[in-house]
């Protein structure tokens, strides 16, 4: 088994393949853990951990907490230390993954892998080329930041998300181009860390592909905290003028700041993989086409993660990789089911989702019922000083099965799990409602939403 790429898609697959007794080699060119660990998930969520702490100080005065300032604003951040912590943590996590793989007996080749037909990978390392014949190959090469021709990152002031952690000071005024998940997360985090932030969004609202109520709420929170959100504003280009950056909008306006983060999505790392030598088909966007058990169009060649464009999440990459190995090695396997994927946007408050979107119900695609409970009514939320957020639950009318949910709350990423469990195990709203929740607790709102849906069956 040869795996090209050591991110979550690759390293989780390697562990499964070893467990099933295969000889496994991972070829990785940057570091174990991949972009997920080195530049994307781990660094961003570590930075956001500090930012989250800063946003919780917002409610301090109303909870009776005094600070050295005039009520909450006596707290500051040490940017250099935050960035050092981010990079150290990423490095340590990468090292842990390498140690684990080595302990399990996975061979690791530091280099770049390329297909030579469907039965061999050629690795280019600093010592030369190495041929690695394989019965099964998994491609898990991930993606990299998309940049615009007219907005070339310089690593100093015009940045991709992989370049943010070399800044030693908080940007005085950060302009974030792109209001998808990555743009929204960083815009919120840097604002919490003390930067002035302008979010440039080409769409009507931030997070255009997410639950509309959640996106509206987070945009209102951003604005309340002083962020400038420019909706329906497409960036034409970004340029440097000395120590300033100028973002030119298509309509002729110019936004000036000290730094600019380009967050306009990713492109798959599939160009130099020798895909044509094995007749591995790609889609129009350059992603590797796969089925629900991660097979490509070439026999014995599988693909997982961001290079497939199925759903750009570390959890999905890891599951696609495991499924590939279970399938290739003849173990029991269930095809990938995206309806069971829970996802989280690490803004403050967080936005977590699972199952079908509400639009499937409002458009009549699913005959379902919806209930939404504001967190402000939840007793624990009142005690914690939480006034923004909600729990939304979707059920199937005829069967009463839970089919989806949205939680907007601090640590929504943890609160979504009972809803995920309900969907994965085909629980009805009554079963969810009848399980005890702690009093008082935020999860009490999930049980209450399920109780409300009891009356919407039929
Ligand atoms: C800022 C940001 C934050 C994110 N936060 C989250 C989050 O909180 N939760 C979540 O689930 N997802 C998150 N994601 C998405 C997540 O990072 C990706 O879905 C995940 O990294 C995909 O894993 P992967 O294994 O496909 O690829 P990667 O993690 O990109 O790993 C692929 C590896 O393959 C290597 N490689 C490429 N080509 C070759 C080659 N030819 N030979 C050898 N090696 C090669 C690359 O260098 C890389 O190390 C985030 C993404 C971004 C951009």
Image (cartoon, helix red, strand yellow):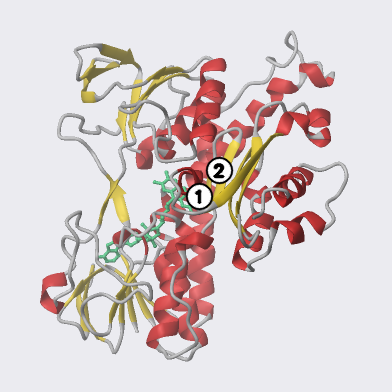
Residue 52, image x, y percentages: 62, 33
Residue 435, image x, y percentages: 81, 58
Residue 269 is marked as: none
Does residue 264 appear in the picture of this structure?
Answer: yes
Instruction: Compare residues 353 and 199 and report the one nearer the observer.
Output: 353
> Residue 374: which quarter of the image?
top right
Instruction: Compare residues 455 and 45 and report the one nearer the observer.
Output: 455
**Is 136 placed left or right of 366 in the picture?**
left
Quadrant (top left/top right/bottom left/bottom right) for the N terminus: bottom left
> In the displayed image of the protein, which residue is found farthest to the right?
439
Is residue 144 positioned above or below 207 on the image? below
CB contact under 8 Å: marks 2 and 1: yes
Residue visible at 29% across and 21% down? 233
State the separation of the CA atoms marked 2 and 1: 6 Å
Does residue 13 appear in the picture of this structure?
Answer: no
Residue visible at 66% across and 28% down? 388
Residue 295, image x, y percentages: 30, 77
Is residue 164 positioned above or below 435 on the image? above
**Is 404 placed left or right of 115 in the picture?**
right
Residue visible at 77% across and 30% down? 377
Residue 26, image x, y percentages: 36, 75
Determine which residue is flagged by label 2: 46
User: Dot 1 surroundings within 10 Å: few (below 14), some, or many (20 or more)?
Assistant: many
Quadrant (top left/top right/bottom left/bottom right) for the C terminus: bottom right
User: Splitting the image into four quadrants, where does ligand 1 fall?
Assistant: bottom left
Q: SS of the residue at dot 2?
A: helix
**Is 87 placed left or right of 256 in the picture?**
right
Determine which residue is flagged by label 1: 42
């Amino acid at each position: 088994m040869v795996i090209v790429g050591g991110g979550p898609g690759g390293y989780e697959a390697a562990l499964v393949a070893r467990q099933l007794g295969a000889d496994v080699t991972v070829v990785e060119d940057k570091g174990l853990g991949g972009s997920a660990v080195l530049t994307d998930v781990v660094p961003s969520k570590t930075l956001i951990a500090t930012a989250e702490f800063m946003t919780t100080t917002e409610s301090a005065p109303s909870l009776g907490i005094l600070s050295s300032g005039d009520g909450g604003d006596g707290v500051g951040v040490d940017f250099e230390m935050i960035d050092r912590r981010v990079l150290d943590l990423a490095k340590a996590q990468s090292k842990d993954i390498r140690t684990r793989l080595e302990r399990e007996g996975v061979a690791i080749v530091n280099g770049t892998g390329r297909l030579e037909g469907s039965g061999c990978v050629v690795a280019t390392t600093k010592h030369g080329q190495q041929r690695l014949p394989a019965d099964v190959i998994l491609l898990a090469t991930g993606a990299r930041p998309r940049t615009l021709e007219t907005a070339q990152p310089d690593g100093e002031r015009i940045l991709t998300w992989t370049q943010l952690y070399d800044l030693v000071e908080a940007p005085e005024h950060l302009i974030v181009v792109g209001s998808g998940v990555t743009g929204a997360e960083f815009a919120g985090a840097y604002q919490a860390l003390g930067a002035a932030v302008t979010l440039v969004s080409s769409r009507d609202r931030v997070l255009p592909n997410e639950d509309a109520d959640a996106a509206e709420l987070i945009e209102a929170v951003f604005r309340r905290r002083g962020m400038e959100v420019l909706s329906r504003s497409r960036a034409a280009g970004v340029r440097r003028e000395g120590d300033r950056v100028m973002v030119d909008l298509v309509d002729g306006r110019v936004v000036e700041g000290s730094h600019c983060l380009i967050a306009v999505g990713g492109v798959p790392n599939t160009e130099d993989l020798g895909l044509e030598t094995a007749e591995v088909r790609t889609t129009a966007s350059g992603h590797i086409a796969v089925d629900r058990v991660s097979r490509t169009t070439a026999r014995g060649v599988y693909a997982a993660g961001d290079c497939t464009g199925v759903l750009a999440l570390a959890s999905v990459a890891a599951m696609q990789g495991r499924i590939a190995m279970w399938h290739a090695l003849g173990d029991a396997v269930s095809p990938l089911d995206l309806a069971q994927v829970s996802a989280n946007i690490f803004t403050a408050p967080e936005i977590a989702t699972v199952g079908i979107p509400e639009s499937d119900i409002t458009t009549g695609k699913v005959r379902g019922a919806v209930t939404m409970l504001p967190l402000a009514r939840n007793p624990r939320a009142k005690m914690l000083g939480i006034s923004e957020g909600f729990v939304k639950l979707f059920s199937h009318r005829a069967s009463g099965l839970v089919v989806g949910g949205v939680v907007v709350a601090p640590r929504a990423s943890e609160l979504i799990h009972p809803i995920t469990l309900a969907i994965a195990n085909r629980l009805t709203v009554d079963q969810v409602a009848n399980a005890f929740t702690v009093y008082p607790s935020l999860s009490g709102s999930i049980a209450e939403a399920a109780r409300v849906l009891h009356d919407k069956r039929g």
